[in-house]
Image (cartoon, helix red, strand yellow):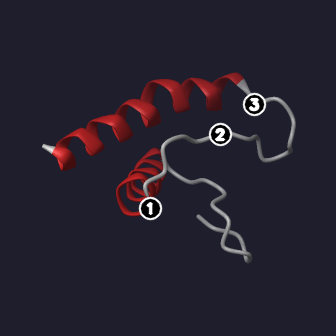
Amino acid sequence: MRDRAGRWTGGSVGQWVEELTGTVLELGASGFILFSASGGTQDGVSLGRWATEIVSSVREAIMKENH
């Protein structure tokens, strides 16, 4: 999901994986920073989902593409 300015604002785990994997493969991104929507500290649920579901899936997708 993107805002009016085109900034990625999140979505489902699948959307995150697709967006981040494409950014690595197409644009050469080598790292990401997770910000909360409110600009404060990230909540535990979002941080846990990021660490256990999104990051591992992006790594797996990149490895499949590069082999």
State the residue at coordinates (53%, 30%). Answer: 49
Are there few (<14), some (14-19), or many (20+) residues within 10 Å of tag 2? few
Instruction: State the image coordinates of residue 12 (x, y, percent, origin top left).
Output: 50, 50
Name the residue that disc number 1 marks: 27
Label 3 is placed on what type of residue? Gln
Above or below for 51 versus 61: above
Label 1 is placed on what type of residue? Leu
In primary-sequence order, the first of circles 1 and 2 is 1
Instruction: State the image coordinates of residue 7 (x, y, percent, origin top left).
Output: 68, 65
In primary-sequence order, the first of circles 2 and 3 is 2
Q: Report the front residue among 7 and 1.
A: 7
State the residue at coordinates (48%, 43%). Answer: 30
Element type at mark 2: loop
Which image quarter: residue 5?
A: bottom right
Name the residue that disc number 2 marks: 33
Above or below for 37 versus 60: below
Name the residue that disc number 3 marks: 42
Above or below for 24 versus 58: below
Which image quarter: residue 67?
A: top left
- Confirm or deny contact between disc 1 and disc 2 (CB under 8 A): no
Label 2 is placed on what type of residue? Ile
Instruction: State the image coordinates of residue 51 (x, y, percent, origin top left).
Output: 51, 25
